[in-house]
Amino acid sequence: LEEAQTRKYPESELLEALHLTVDEAEKCQTVANQLGNKKVRTRTRGVLDAKSRLTVEELQLFSSQLDTLPVKVSGKECVTQLLDQVQKFQESANAMLSKSKSQDLEDLKKLIETGSALDVDLQELNDLKGKAKELEWLDEAKEIMDDPMGDSTDHIKQVIETGMELAPSPKVEKLLGELSGLLTQVESWENRAKSCLASKPRLSLSELEKLSRSEEHTSEPVTSRSRMPSSA
């Protein structure tokens, strides 16, 4: 191409095809170098949104395109290596997600970090993030049920709302039912307490102590017998 430009060869179909081939090869090389640059991927991971990332299918098509180019493009090895890393990640992610026993949250986070560093749009990565969010929510919900009166009604409502956004599962549905039952009991007690404090004539100290004891009694069965039935 340089020779044709230097010697000012006349335009022809062959020269035009050569121009197109070189342009395509240069674009492919730029993309290949970007994909293979580990430092760039590590520095920008978590910043690129899904729209700016290649899907696995697009990455595979791009690799095939490099194979069919009539010229050699540097960076092809990096693309092949990235495809291998993606495949290994997918295998690890599917193995983690298919576990019959509960997944370990720390293991999930490590795998999520590995997948995020690839800067490829991966469905398995989204599934892992959803599972990690579920485990974090289950831990928070269990803490509330273990100490029912240690949380405010606003916090319990917030946890319930977060749980409603999770993908349905027996464990989530069960704890959502329990939290709803707890919230109902706590709000009922708070309403009775407000009514008593606002009543006229004022309640005696013994009556207030009785109300306080009823609150302690209400909090105990919430974690065992008096939970709202769940759909699990």
Image (tube, rainbow, N blue to C red):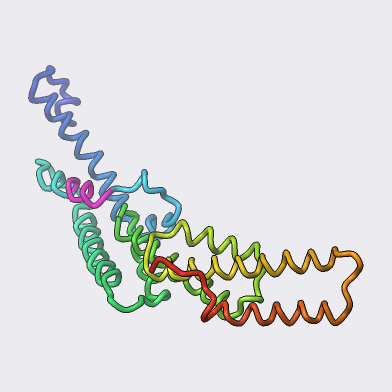
Is 166 rendered above or below residue 108? above
Q: Quadrant of residue 181?
A: bottom right
Question: Which residue is found at the position 16% from the left and 20% from the top?
Answer: 8
Question: Which residue is found at the position 39% from the left and 55% from the top?
Answer: 40
Judged left or right of residue 188, residue 231 is: left
Locate the N terminus by quadrant: top left
**Residue 170 x %, y %:** 37, 69
Is 61 rendered above or below residue 207? above
Q: Is residue 137 visible?
A: no
Question: Which residue is found at the position 54% from the left and 76% from the top?
Answer: 226
Nearer-the-camera pick, 82 or 168? 168
Locate the C terminus by quadrant: bottom left
**Residue 26 x %, y %:** 24, 39
Nearer-the-camera pick, 99 or 212? 212
**Residue 58 x %, y %:** 22, 46
Q: Is residue 218 visible?
A: yes
Residue 94 in magenta? no
Is 19 rendered above or below residue 137? above
Please tell me whether the stretch drawn in magenta is mainly helix, strand or loop. helix
**Residue 60 x %, y %:** 18, 50
Numbered label tally = 0
Question: Which residue is found at the position 55% from the left and 76% from the top?
Answer: 145
Nearer-the-camera pick, 1 or 232? 232
Q: Residue lying at the far front in this picture: please name it.
A: 201
Residue extent of the magenta highlight = 55-62
Residue 57 in magenta? yes
Q: Residue lying at the far right in this picture: please name it.
A: 201
Q: Quadrant of residue 194?
A: bottom right
Judged left or right of residue 226, residue 41 is: left
